[in-house]
Structures are given as structure tokens and as C-alpha cells.
Image (cartoon, rainbow, N blue to C red):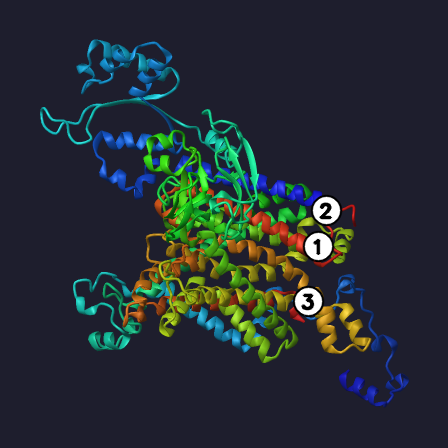
Amino acid sequence: MDMEAKKTKQGNYINLEDTGLTDEELFQRIPQDTASIEKITAPKYSYWQSVMRVFFRKKSNIVVVALFVIILVFTFIYPMINGYDKYGNLMDSSTKHLTPSAAMEKFGFSIHYLFGTGDSGQSTFDSIWYGARISLALAAICSVINMTIGILVGALWGFSKRVDIVMNELRNIIGNVPGTLIISVMVMVFSPSFWTLIFAMCITGWIGIAYSMRTQVMIIRDREYNLASRCLGTSTLRIATKNILPYMISFIVTLAANEIPMYISQEVFLSYIGLGISDTTLGKIIFNAQSAMVTPGWGWEFWPPVMLAAFISIILFLVGQSLGDAADPRTHM
Amino acid sequence: MVKYFFKRLFRGIISVVIAVGIIMILIYSLLDNTLIFAEDPQYMKLGNNQKIIYMYQMWKNYGYVDYVSYSDYLNKLVADGEIDEEFRDSIASIGRTPDKDSKDVKEYVEKFTKYYEDKGYTILRLDAVMASKRKVATGGTQALLAYQNKPVLERVASYFGSILTFDNIHYVKEDIGKRGLTFTLHDPAYGGDKFAPAIIGNGTRHKYLLYVDSRFPYVHQNFVKITLGTSYSINKGIDVFETMTQTQGSYVVSPTYYPSGIVAESADDLHTATYAAGSREANLVYEEHYTDDYTNVSLTRNSGSRITYSFVIGIIGSIITYFIGLPLGILMAKKKDTWVDRLGNAYVIFMIAVPGLAYIFMFKAIGNRLGLPTAFSLDNPSAAMYIMPILSSVVASVAGTMRWMRRYMVDQMNSDYVKFARSEGLTEGEIFTKHIFKNAAIPVTHGIPSAFVGALAGSIVTERVYLIPGVGGLLVQAIGAYDNSVIVGVAIFYGMLYIIAAIMGDIVMAIMDPRISFTSKAR
């Protein structure tokens, strides 16, 4: 058949009568396939596969993701296996406030003393990862709670007129008082611990997310394609999940990228003004190290936690930004 | 439009009242009352029963409880004429323990107990604390008192009711002669020769209701006083608003013209004189200096108030931010997708992602290296000590301004009217300055009033790092010392600044862009 078709294209016509075959032998009747009539032939599209394809198309994203994985490994697995003990060297005064080179000289080369030692002779390298674990967990939990509440409330807020009136008033009330003030008072009232800090950060934190979500939903809700979809009889749930959610995902991911560094920064700030939690966090380490910074020769202690906080924040931010771009269906073409 | 803004202001005030009310309820109902004594040296010194009585006295003064001691009750009975003073003295001292009371005392203690228990008070009888068999320990004297916790909602209501006080000529209860206000062009506090308009009251709380002096804002008034709550430990006994606005530092002595005609070198600021009943009789110096009982003056100090420092640093920082941030943002938009844009974006991302504290410390370290002062000092002020705080706030806020300016410019660049202008043959420079910039500047102007008003609030981190005696540090200090009324006062101050800034932003935007209207009718 293929050969025949090629010949036909090249212009070598074959007279059917020359073949000497009957019509029955030449042609075959195929029953009509109603299912395939409806089928629109287009390349197969899977949303998440496309997101990944677009995301990894940029080579720099691979590096960023690799760094992100390294951070996760060091924050969550490394402290578990190395058994960090802050007061292990407490009795030996010669181990305190050492620069990296002095520490290496004393203890021999090891990854623990890459950044020298702190005021109790503890390894700065170990302690910053230990602190990062709590800071990152705090930021992640706060983000998850705030994003979940914010997105659900925001979706409802965008869809319902009646909810809109109530929520706008609520936002006016909360928005008129600086967030820092609310968090400070909350932390002061409920003594500072890991979970109360989360509570304080989440009690009003969701409203900003909900408000931006509301605006986004309102913009997309009344687009023509949604109107058309509704006219064709699509259910509200399907419109919400299939028509609106894909647009929202890029927005949500971008938002999350901004949220996590913000909470890390906020935790550092709260620790600094004395409202932080008692556990070792990045903020606490920075707070404790600031006195060392103004002492000549001890300045080394201050930079590793600051740089780690900056590094984690920037990596998370970049991952979020790129993922947000990739999650936008408009970039999938 | 005016009506719209008044409506918004009103709604804003309502929401601030609700939010501050919630904060008050949280603080006063969930926080342990005894925490306010955490930083009180007087409290540390006292012991035994005296400590407990002191606590109740302070709680009464700061509105936590209603408290009546047994002797107050007896004095009340004397005033009502039920008992005479001699009899009061005989029953005034209660026994070391209840079973040691004499018969009369027992009777009156029972009366006291019954009277206040019926009113819902709790009776507290403290038995003497003995050091030895005979000797009472220091501060261990027996005591009898009744107290009642004030309901939080009542506190909230009375707090908001007393924020604004209007001075009037019937303030003074005593006979003070002819009450009224007099207007003078030659303020007697300046010797009576210098031209300085003033309104002086008699019968009012303040002597000077309106006066002019050389301090910002130059014209001062005392008709309306704002009270935001009395501080307990930050600035004991002084109102929060006054704490923010009063001068700081060391005293300044200058020739002072007292009402009696005496001219002396003194730090007394006569313009702040308030009425203190019977003060001249009690104090010979007052008798000599003053002709009336307006003797309660505060002292002039050489440095600015907390608000002044916060404002000066904030305002200079904001101006520099706009002068650097806007051109950079425009440049980024103009050179979109080139290395300039990428470099700018990297800077913006770095600033957003890095914890704010981190680079402020970084700057402090750099400042130290360069030999610039990194701590504020009121004793030897210099212009150099402003450099680092302003610089570190500018570096952070420039990133935000750049980012938004770029965003607005880029948004405008893609709009149809720009394409049309280009097709008309306008040069790129003309399009940028006459079309894109004008439109992109509108949302930017919205932020300018909040930058200026926000400068009054100060910055918590900058002020703490550089030890600036500003408003921003007040909240943190208050939280550290559990000075609850200061926390509430600062909260209401911040809340009001926020709503005023937001409304002013909208007004400026409406002035800049005539297309914007806030009333549906005008559309």
C-alpha cells in the first residue's frame, strides 16, 4: 500500500482495471466509528508533565534544585546523624571562639569545624544546621497553614458576594494594625514556644494571602472562556478545578516562594527583639552571635548563620519563582 | 469626595478601636497581672505584706482593680459623720491576727467585710509576719483590704473615653478669681517685650493654651490633649504620647522670666505650666517665683523627642530612597532583558530574600570598619551618627521602590497607547517621559504619604541596632518590661498612622490622576 501511495504521489497512475481485481477485492467497507469522530487530534497534554518539562528546560533550575536538595539533606538528615551537642566542649576554654583555621589546627580537619567554634566551644557548622532545621520547619508549617486557610477562604471570598462584604470588613480591621504588633503581643501573651509562635504567625497571616487569592479568582472567574464553559453545562466544581485552578497554581507557587523566606526573616526578627522561642533557631544564633561580632577576632561567628539564612531564603525564592513560571500554563506552548 | 474620605476615616477609626480593644482584652485578661512589676525596683525592695499592699495600690493606680483599705473605709465613715475622729483612731489598728482584735475593732472589721462583700469585693486580711516572737518582720505589718478586679470591657470603654481631653476654664475646682482666656501678642514668658502671640487661660488645666517657641512645630496648643495611657516602667507615671513627644537628653539652662518678675537661669519651661492646687503654700520657691498656682512645669532638654528622631531619620531615608529607587527602576524598565535589568533584579531578590536584620548588621560592621559612629549618643550629637541608620534603611527600601517602579513601567510599556504613540513617530525619549512615566508614577505617588507618615512610627530594627532613642524602640522596650499601657498606646498610635497614611495616599493619587474617583456618582 505504501509503495502504491508513493508512486501515486510521484505521478505514476495505475489504472484499476489493469489490476484485474474485482471491486470487492479492491475495497473494503469500514463501519463508522462514532467515538473517533469526536476525537480531536492534538499532541497529548499532561499539566504536571509540562510543568516539569518547562521547569527543567532551563539549565540553571537544575543547579538550584540540586542546592535545594542539599539544603534539605543538611537541615533534616545531617543533625540526626551527627549527634550535635552544644555543651560537649563547655569545660575546655581553649575551644571557644575559634576561627576556622584555629579550630582545624586544634581538632584536625573535619567538616564540623569548617566555620570555627562558638561561645561554648560548639561547632558553628553543626549548630547552624541544627538551627536551620527548626527555622525551616517553622517557616514551612506556617506557610502550609496560612496558604491552606488563605487559599480556601480566598476562593470562597472571590466566588461569593456575601462573603466578600464580611471579609472586607474583617480585613479592614486586621489590616489597620501592623502585623508585627499583633505577633509581638500574641507571643508575649502566650509564652514563646514553637507552637505558640506558629499560632501567632498564623492568626492573621492568612488574611493577606486570602485577599490576593480573592482578587485573582475574581479576575479569572468572569473571563469569557469560563462563561462559555458554563454555557456548555460544565459544573462549578469542574470549572473551579479544571479552568481556574491551573491559573491559580502559578500564583500559589509564587506566593509560597515569598512566604517561606518571609517567615524565616520574621523569626530572626522576633528572636532579635527578644520574643523568639527558646530553642536554637537561626534567629537565636544570629541574636547570640551579634555580641561576638563587635568583639575583634570573633567576627567569624556572626556570618555563617546570616549567610545560611540568606542562602536558604534565596534558594527557596528561586525555586519558587521558576516553579511559578513553569506552572503558568501559558508558558507550556 | 470629602464625604467619602470622612466616611473612610470614621470606618478606619472604628476598626482601630476594635483591633486595639482586642489587644487590650488579650493583654489584660490573659497576661499575669504581676508581670508588670518585672522591672520595678521599688517592688524588689519591699517585702512581706508591704509588697502585697504595694501591688494592690499600683493595680489600683493603673486601673486593674478597685481597692479599698480598712483605713480608707474608716476615713469615709468619718467624712459621712458616722463616727468621730477620736473613735476612728481607737479602732484604726487591727490585731496581728483576727483573734487578737479588740471588741470594737472586731465589730468594724465585720462591718467592713460585710459592706464590701455585698458590693462584690474580695476581702483580704494579711496577718502580721513575725521575725521573732515579739518583733514584726520588715514590711510584715498586718493589713486589711478589699479589692475587686475591674471587668476588661469596662477598662476598654473607659480607655477609649479618655483618649481626648479638652481643656476648659472650669477645670480648676478651687476659687481662682476671674476665669477666662486672654490673648496676648507679647508672651510674658519671653519677658513681655518680644513679639510672640499666646493664649493664656485662667481656670484651665494648662496656663498656656497656645504659644510659639523655637521647637518644631513652632506653634503649640494645649486645648486638646491626647492621652494614650500611663506608662508603668518605661517612663513611670508619664503618658505614652508625652513619652513620644517630650524632649530628651540633658537639661538646658536659659534666662527664664517668672510671673513674679524674677529672672533666673533655669531649665523650667513655663509654657508647660499646669495647675497644682495649693502648691505655692507648700513650696517657698514657688511662692517666690509664681503669682498663681500654675506651677507644675516640665524642664527643657537639649535633644529632640522620640518622634523627632524617628521622623528625621525616616524622612531623610524616604527621600533618598525615592531619589535613588525611582531612577534605577526606570533604568531597569528601559534596559529590560539586558544585563542592567538582570543585575537590578538580582539585587531586588537578594534584598527580599535575606533576613532584614542580616544586612543591617552587615552595615553596622562595615560602618565600624570605616570608623563611622554606629551608636546614637545624645550627649555629643553629630551629623555623622545619622549616616549609618539612614544608609542601612535606604539600601533595603530602594529594592522595593526599584521593583515596583520597574513593574509599573513595564506594564505601561506594553499598553496600546504606547504602541500608538510610537506609530505616530514620537521618539522613545518622549514616549518614556511624557507617556509611560506619567502613568507609571501614579501608583508610586500612592506610597509617598505612607512613607512620610510611616516615618513617625520609626523602625524597630534600625532603632534598636543603632541605639536611636526613637518611637520604634518603644514597643519592644514596653514588651520587654511588660508595660501594658505603653503597648496599647503604641498600638493605637500605629493604627491611627496606618489609616491616615492610607487615606492620604488615596487623596494624593486622586489629585495626580483626575480619572480616579472614589465616589460612584462622579463616574
Q: Amino acid at mark 3?
A: Asp
Numbered label attached to residue B510: 1
The alpha-carbon separation of the residues under discs 1 and 3 comes to 20 Å
Instruction: Give the x, y percent position of residue B413.
Output: 71, 70
Callout 2: SS:
loop
Whether residue A151 is visible to the viewer of this picture, yes or no, is no
Q: Is residue B88 above or below residue A200?
A: above
Q: Is residue A103 above or below residue A158?
A: below
**Quadrant including the N terminus of chain A:** bottom right
The alpha-carbon separation of the residues under discs 3 and 2 comes to 29 Å
Task: Name the one closer to the observer, A302 or A150.
Answer: A302
Instruction: Give the x, y percent position of residue B156.
Output: 48, 33
Q: Residue at x 35, y 45 (%)?
A: B481
**Quadrant including the C terminus of chain A:** bottom right
Whether residue B136 is visible to the viewer of this picture, yes or no, is yes
Q: Amino acid at mark 2?
A: Met
Q: Is residue A164 above or below residue B291?
A: below
Residue projecting furthest to the left: B133
Task: Name the one closer to the observer, B408 or B496.
Answer: B496
* Residue identifier under label 2: B1
Contact? badges 3 and 2 (CB < 8 Å): no
Question: Disc 1 sits on a residue from what chain?
Answer: B
Numbered label attached to residue B384: none
Q: Residue at x 61, y 51 (%)?
A: B502
Task: Name the one closer to the observer, A97 or B221.
Answer: B221
The alpha-carbon separation of the residues under discs 2 and 1 comes to 10 Å
Q: Residue at x 66, y 65 (%)?
A: B408
* Residue identifier under label 3: B411
Contact? badges 2 and 1 (CB < 8 Å): yes
- Marks 3 and 2 belong to one chain: yes
Q: Amino acid at mark 1?
A: Ala
